[in-house]
Image (spheres, rainbow, N blue to C red):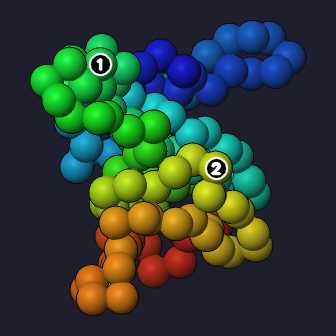
Amino acid sequence: MVRDKVLEHDAATGQIKATHTLPESVDATTHEWGYVAYRDGLLFGTATIREAIDAKLRRRGNPGSDATDTIFAIDVQSGEHLWSYQGKSIAHHTIALSQNRVFFIDSSVTANSEPPSCVKTRPSWKS
């Protein structure tokens, strides 16, 4: 990982095969990759506020957060961003992958909140 990019390497040669970026909806000047996982040809990631910005916010009275606000999936073969979810407080340790599903807790969602939605670019994220 290099801040706003994840480099995919060929295991045999070490050469860079692809560069995966944050979703277009995420500001790469304030966010970087946080959580990274691979399953069944899909790369899952989160966009997390950069440490320097998070530290600056804490100095200004904002307690900061070790959580992320965006989780997304990328088809590794095509490089296509398949879906993203814009939340407010998704702790990395709550993310779990299963077959055809991603589970996580967005602690900002309450019983009175609108149901969360996911922005999909394809009807199914299974290749």
Q: Residue furthest front?
A: 61
Give the residue drawn at x 64%, y 49%. Answer: 93
- What element does badge 1 sit on? helix
Q: As displayed, is residue 39 above or below residue 58?
A: below
Give the residue drawn at x 21%, y 34%. Answer: 62
Question: Which label number is shown at residue 55?
Answer: 1
Q: As displayed, is residue 43 above or below residue 87?
A: above
Reading the chain from its start, which is encountered first: label 2 or label 1? 1
Tell me: 37 left or right of 122: right
Q: Residue furthest top?
A: 14
Number of residues whose C-alpha sits closer than 10 Å to that of mark 1, classed few (under 14), some (14–19) or many (20 or more): some
Which residue is tagged 2?
93
Depth check: give the residue in front, 91 or 101.
Answer: 91
Depth check: give the residue in front, 111 or 73.
Answer: 111
Depth check: give the residue in front, 120 or 104.
Answer: 104
Give the residue drawn at x 68%, y 11%. Answer: 15
